[in-house]
Image: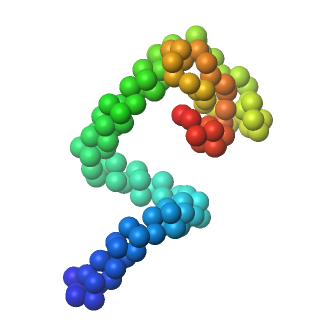
Amino acid sequence: MSVVSLRRKEYLRQWRENHREQAREASKQWRRNNREKHREDTRQYRLNHPKKHCENQKRYRKNNPEKTKVHNVVWSHPEKYPLDDKCVFCGRTEKLEHGHLDYEDNGDNYVTVCHQCNHWMGVD
């Protein structure tokens, strides 16, 4: 790498540290505008770095034991936790998920939501 590109890289790293909120918003905006590219990049990263992906999953499960427990219960007993025909918020009928309001009741407290509304709720 040239000296100029190294300086630019360092400058951008410092800018992101000093403007975290702006950088986060810019990143979200890019992902919204480039959904397919982002999906493919993410898929390629997972395929090329399986150990890191596995480590990230382990860290998530360790940091979110109550969510992990509920997700495992719901996925292992789909007949006990059926989804409705449409999202309770927007009425969509595709990409439906269990939107858990809390994780203290072993999965019984959920609503049927689409992926987008589940993300909007801020709860998995």
Is any part of residue 58 visible from this angle? yes
Q: On screen, 69 above or below 93?
A: above
Q: How many labels, in total?
A: 0
Locate the N terminus and report the quarter of the image it occupies.
Answer: bottom left
Q: Quadrant of residue 86?
A: top right
Q: Position of residue 30 (x, y in %)?
A: 54, 65
**Residue 50 appears in the picture as rendered:** no
For residue 52, side relative to residue 90 (left or right) = left
The x, y position of residue 95, in whole percent, is 63, 36
Horizontal relation, residue 108 to residue 16: left or right:
right
Q: Residue furthest right?
A: 91
**Percent position (x, y) of residue 39?**
48, 54
Pinpoint residue 61: horizontal percent, then vertical percent: 35, 31
Taking the spot 22% from the left edge, 87% from the top edge, the residue there is: 2
The residue depicted at 38 percent of the width and 25 percent of the height is 65
Horizontal side of residue 68 vs 7, given as left or right: right
Q: 5 or 77, which lies in front?
A: 5
